[in-house]
């Protein structure tokens, strides 16, 4: 029955000027940042359009030195004109952590969208992962920092 409907549905979509390829080309929102009651949505192209930062570090969740590329948390905070408060970072499973705005420093954490040059799947801690440069400073090697290293990130809400 469904197989019989497929040509009809495809014909209808084509008659409306909508191809199946065009439907799949719609950009997927990876990150929603809510600030001052305004939701800002970022897809991968939006994130890639921001200044990319790459850090090389070992993590407690991976083997060996890893390369992570993404947006500096400092850039996101600066773009929002934040100088104080917290970021409530949430994952797709609703796990939420508080990250103080003071963590968003030059040379600090990034919102990674690439690991070793490749996009991260949801199964592999992606699509987005907040990664600190753990090897660059002993202050980044603590349970507090590890708990802020949220993967499968999909939302950030600002709080004063």
Image (spheres, rainbow, N blue to C red):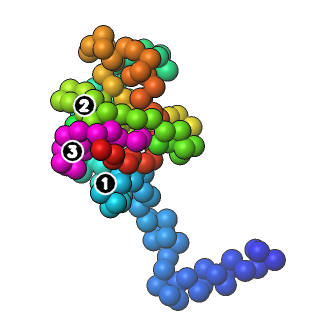
- Quick one: SS at disc 2? helix
* Within-10-Å neighbours for mark 2: few <14, some 14–19, many 20+: some
In the depicted structure, whether residue 44 falls above or below residue 68: below
Furthest residue in direction top, as rendered: 138
Look at the image and say whether residue 150 sits in the magenta stretch: no
Crowd rating for badge 1 (residues with CA inside 10 Å; few <14, some 14–19, many 20+): some
Q: Is residue 96 left or right of residue 31?
A: right
Residue at horizontal 56%, vertical 37%? 123
Counting from the top left corner in percent of width and height, residue 71 is at 27, 40
Q: Which residue is mark 3?
A: 82
Quarter assignment of residue 89: top left
- Going from the N terminus, do you reach mark 2 or mark 1 first? 1
Tell me the number on the disc at residue 63. Answer: none
* Residue 56 image offset from top left, x and y in percent: 30, 22
Q: Which stretch is magenta?
A: 76-89
Query: Residue 72, can we see it?
Result: no
Q: Are marks 2 and 1 in contact (CB under 8 Å)?
A: no
Residue 41, quarter of picture: bottom left
Q: Quadrant of the C terminus?
A: top left
Depicted 11 relative to depicted 71: above or below: below
| Mark 3 residue element | loop
Q: Nearer the viewer, residue 51 or 79?
A: 79
Q: Is residue 54 left or right of residue 131?
A: left
- Considering only order in the chain, which callout, 3 or 1, is on the residue closer to the N terminus? 1
Q: Are marks 1 and 3 in contact (CB under 8 Å)?
A: yes
The residue carrying mark 2 is 102
Q: Position of residue 115 (x, y in %)?
A: 39, 32
Q: At x 30% / y 14%, what residue is drawn?
A: 139
Kindly identify which residue carries mark 1: 35
């Amino acid at each position: 029955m469904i197989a019989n409907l497929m040509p009809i549905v495809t014909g209808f979509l084509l008659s409306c000027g909508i191809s199946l390829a065009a439907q799949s080309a719609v950009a997927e929102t990876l990150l929603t940042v809510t600030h001052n009651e305004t939701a800002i949505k970022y897809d991968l192209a939006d994130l890639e359009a921001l200044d990319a930062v790459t850090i090389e570090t070992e993590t407690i969740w991976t083997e060996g030195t890893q390369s992570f590329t993404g947006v500096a948390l400092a850039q996101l905070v600066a773009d929002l004109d934040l100088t104080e408060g917290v970021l409530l970072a949430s994952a797709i499973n609703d796990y939420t952590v508080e990250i103080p705005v003071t963590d968003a420093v030059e040379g600090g954490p990034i919102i990674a969208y690439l690991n070793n040059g490749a996009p991260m799947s949801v199964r592999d801690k992606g699509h987005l992962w907040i990664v600190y440069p753990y090897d660059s400073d002993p202050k980044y090697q603590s349970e507090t920092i590890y708990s802020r290293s949220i993967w499968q990130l999909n939302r950030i809400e600002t709080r004063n």
